[in-house]
Amino acid sequence: MREGMTADAFAHLDPELAAFLSACPGMFPLGMTREELAAKQGLGQLSAADVLGDADVTCIDHEIVGHGGASIVVSIIAPRGHAGTGPGIYHVHGGGMVMANRFAGADVLARWALEYGAVCVTVEYRLAPAHEAPTLVEDCYAGLVWMRENAASLGVDPDRIVIFGGSAGGGLAAGTALLARDRGGPKLLGQILQCPMIDDRSDSASARQFEGTGVWDRQCNVTAWQAVLGERYGTDAVDPYSAPARMADLSGLPPTFIDVGSAETFRDEAIDYAQRLMTAGNACELHVWPGAFHGFYTIAPHTTVSRACVAARDAWLARLLGS
């Protein structure tokens, strides 16, 4: 958080989250400009050990072919000694499409692997600004196709693959699901989109309402989208698979879980996407968490609202998987 912010900046927040945020100034990329981007790109660079700890799972890396024939890496997280077939969880990490790596936000994968006998794949898609759209979402789609094509050897039931992502990962997961639909690609059982980054226009009421507050605001968002889209930023030439809010047709998509904080820039675009999914005939569960800033459930997991958020997400997944 930027130095010099007043108490008013915390007035809209859940009290536990406000106390957490006020205690860690300067920790997040709030207000990030293009000039500051290079210095922020090391955020969220985690290792398997950082997120898996001593969980009784294995983590194996594979090189696969990404967009344009380039080599990218996926990591397979599965219960140690996994045998037979189980559901597959395909994970896309967050970080504004400009930072972090495949292990950011992946701590839950070990728990899901053990609870459901699931095989989880997390993809190292290439980041902006070194790589512009559509490379990022195409890398994610390549990883999903690889997972489906290798389902038998991975021990994945090809009819029970769920895609999961938060923030930028939620937006890229949504775009990957759209690509799978339109290309006749892997059939998804469901998609979990947490506080998804899906609209490059950054012009919603919530984007402006929370300018300069929380952990990721409109300035961060504009900087990231400019890096992703390059000269197409602000034009009608934006690829809707990279910015799924621009997709006119949202029919034929899998059951969806969407959640978002009430006090974050992505609130209105997430609500609108959920409403449009339902209008198009899809099943969608939407949660708007009161007083929550962006990514609260991973940043401040000890808080009451974060625990409620995780419980709702996990309950949805359990119902989807029939557990």
Image (cartoon, rainbow, N blue to C red):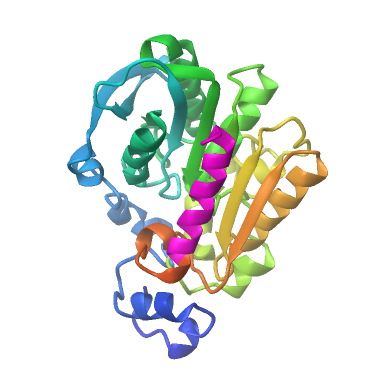
Q: Residue at x 35, y 75 (%)?
A: 20
Measured as percent of width and height from the top left, residue 103 is found at: 31, 40
From the viewer's side, name the closer residue of 55 and 272: 55
Residue 99 lies, with reference to residue 102, above or below; the image says below
Dividing the image into 4 quarters, which one contains the N terminus? Answer: bottom left
Identify the residue shown where x is 30% and y is 19%: 62
How far across and how far down the image is residue 170, in percent?
52, 44
Residue 2 visible? The answer is: no
**Per the image, is 115 magenta?**
no
Task: Please say if 16 is above or below 149.
Answer: below
For the record, the magenta segment spans 306-323
The residue at the point 51 percent across, 36 percent down is 323
Residue 4 rendering spot, x and y as whole percentages = 36, 85
Q: Quadrant of residue 208?
A: bottom right
Q: Which quadrant of the structure image shows residue 57? A: top left
Reply above or below: 149 against 38. Answer: above
Determine if the magenta segment contains residue 315.
yes
Between 160 and 272, the one lying in front of the other is 160
Query: Quick check: can you spot residue 214?
Result: yes
Q: In this view, does 204 lie to the left or right of 307?
A: right
Q: Which residue is drawn at 45% across and 81% down?
A: 15
